């Protein structure tokens, strides 16, 4: 459907606070991060004045890891003084920093449903009830009496999606939730 699956570490400074998370994420195939593979890593930044910036290079694998370890050993053998960071490095962060967990995201859902009339109506009604707008729906029939339904949403709150996923299991015609992946654009 035009997406590539990547494991992303995401950090955003929003009006509500700092949004920091790591999870598998779909990104558009034309996003430069979609072409980062193998032992390469990339960092994509967006600056107010400079726009989009991407830093790209080897960051994993046998040679880069071995090089980093040897470099650390050589540095440690040449320096007898200890080095400590000047800030407290813990998960709380600075006391004025507000971290948020109820962030906005688009979602990709893959469902196995009974291939009967009214199923999509029940599902879309549940989404609407929880304040989630559906951007795209694709249904494929399978060999038995079930169908595979793929839903892509407009941006919605994480809490709304969690509530919707819980309620989807209570719809009798929904056999299985096969996938739930966030989408970043």
Image: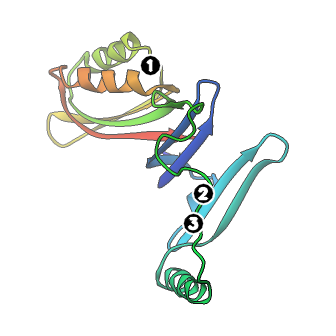
Looking at the rendered structure, the secondary structure element under dot 3 is strand
Q: Residue furthest front?
A: 81
Compared with 165, 81 (above or below) is below
Q: Residue at x 33, y 26 (%)?
A: 162
Mark carried by residue 33:
2
Q: Calculate the distance from the C-alpha at mark 2 to the C-alpha at mark 1.
A: 27 Å
Q: Which mark is residue 41?
A: 3
Q: Residues within 10 Å of mark 2 (few under 14, many from 20)?
A: some
The colour style of the image is rainbow
Q: Is residue 40 visible?
A: yes
Picture residue at 45% right of the left edge, 39% below the top: 182
Q: Nearer the viewer, mark 3 or mark 2?
A: 3
- The residue carrying mark 1 is 132
Q: Quadrant of residue 107?
A: top left
Question: Which secondary structure, mark 2?
Answer: helix
Q: Position of residue 145 (x, y in %)?
A: 15, 34
* Nearer to us: label 3 or label 1: 3
Instruction: Name the one closer to the observer, 99 or 25.
Output: 99
State whether residue 141 is above or below residue 50.
Answer: above
Q: Earlier in the sequence, mark 3 or mark 1?
A: 3
Upstream in the sequence, badge 3 or badge 2? 2
Q: Identify the element where label 1 is drawn.
A: loop
Drawn side of residue 153 relative to residue 58, left or right: left
**Residue 71 image point, x, y percent:** 58, 85
Q: Residues within 10 Å of mark 1 (few under 14, many from 20)?
A: many
Q: CA distance from mark 3 to mark 1?
A: 33 Å
Residue in the image at 24% along x and 20% along y: 167
């Amino acid at each position: 459907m035009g997406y590539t699956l990547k494991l992303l570490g995401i950090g955003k400074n929003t009006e509500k606070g700092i949004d920091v998370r790591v999870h598998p994420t779909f990104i558009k195939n034309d996003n430069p991060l979609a072409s980062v593979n193998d032992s390469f890593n990339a960092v994509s930044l967006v600056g107010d004045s400079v726009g989009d910036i991407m830093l790209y290079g080897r960051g994993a694998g046998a040679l880069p890891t071995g090089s980093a370890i040897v470099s650390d050993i050589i540095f440690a053998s040449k320096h007898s003084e200890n080095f400590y960071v000047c800030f407290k490095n813990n998960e709380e962060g600075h006391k004025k920093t507000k971290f948020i967990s109820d962030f906005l995201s688009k979602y990709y859902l893959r469902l196995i449903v009974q291939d009967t009339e009214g199923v999509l109506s029940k599902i879309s009604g549940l989404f609407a009830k929880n304040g989630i707008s559906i951007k795209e729906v694709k249904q494929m029939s399978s060999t038995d009496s079930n169908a595979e339904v793929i839903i892509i949403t407009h941006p919605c709150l994480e809490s709304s999606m969690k509530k919707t996923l819980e309620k989807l299991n209570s719809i009798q015609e929904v056999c299985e939730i096969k996938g739930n992946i966030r989408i970043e654009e």
